[in-house]
Image (spheres, rainbow, N blue to C red):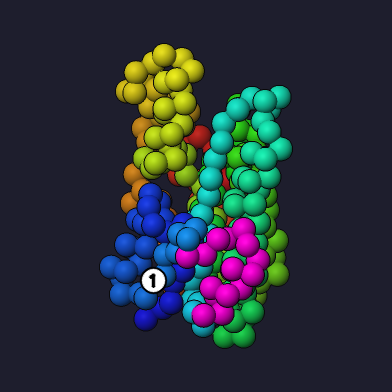
Amino acid sequence: MRIVVVTGGTRGIGAAVAARFRAAGDQVHAPGRADCDVTDEDAVARYFDGLGPVDVLVNNAGISASAPLAKTSLEQWRSQFEVNATGAFLCTRAVLPGMRSRDTGRIVTVASTASHIGYRYTAGYTASKHAAVGLMRATAAELAGTGVTANAVCPAFVRTDMTAASVARIQERTGRDEADAEAALAAASPLGRLLEPDEVAHAVAFFAAAEAAAINGQTLVLDGGGIQS
């Protein structure tokens, strides 16, 4: 039985990932912000010290905000970097020594198609997700030739509360109804629809599988074929 940690695991993608690992018989810890604030160095250290050895870390905690670059506040910029990039760094750093000492482990970061391309009105989110993938690749380079791997899953828009908030912002700004606003997001990828959280969970579980030991430093894009990576 593996010990699995899924940050931001109380809802959306995180909850689906946690459920998939539990169904496979793993012992899953799925902390929300109240359990482990991934932006707080001391809180992260305390949380992981209390768990002991971790076999799989899923860096899933994330936030987003939308605004034209000229109207993006420094607070919005910093908060997205703190959760999306610094959070992944702190949690990865916390589990890495134990994984290296046992020469086994999986680190999977839930990123975004925004890790590969730029979307309008998402400067902070896009930049922070690029940073999260850059962290993954640097980590993978250090892990090359070991039994530990680091990879990232990069989905297009997923049917979650975060996406629902994006739909609501489109409605507010454009006057569209909910169905049309959701269709506008879905049209951003060749898939032509929103992903379901279980689809992302499947991709995460793939990277975490024992059979994926030869895959390191890679991104798996879930968008129907728009981005080649």
Q: Between 223 and 98, which is closer to the camera in this rendering? A: 98
Residue 205 pos. (x, y %): 41, 62
Residue 3 pos. (x, y %): 43, 77
Which residue is painted at 32% across and 69% down in the image?
22
Secondary structure of the magenta portion, mostly? helix
Question: Label 1 amino acid?
Answer: Val
**Residue wearing tag 1:** 28
Q: Between 190 and 120, which is closer to the camera in this rendering? A: 120
Q: Considering only vertical position in the picture, is 42 above or below 2?
A: above
Most extreme residue toward the bottom is: 102
Q: Between 6 and 145, which is closer to the camera in this rendering? A: 6
Question: Residue 122 appears in which quarter of the rendering?
Answer: top right
Question: Is any atom of residue 141 visible in this view?
Answer: yes
Q: Is residue 40 magenta?
A: yes
Q: Considering only vertical position in the picture, is 79 above or below 225?
A: below
The reply, left or right, for residue 86 in relation to residue 173 is right
Residue 20 pos. (x, y %): 33, 62
The residue segment tinted magenta is 35-50
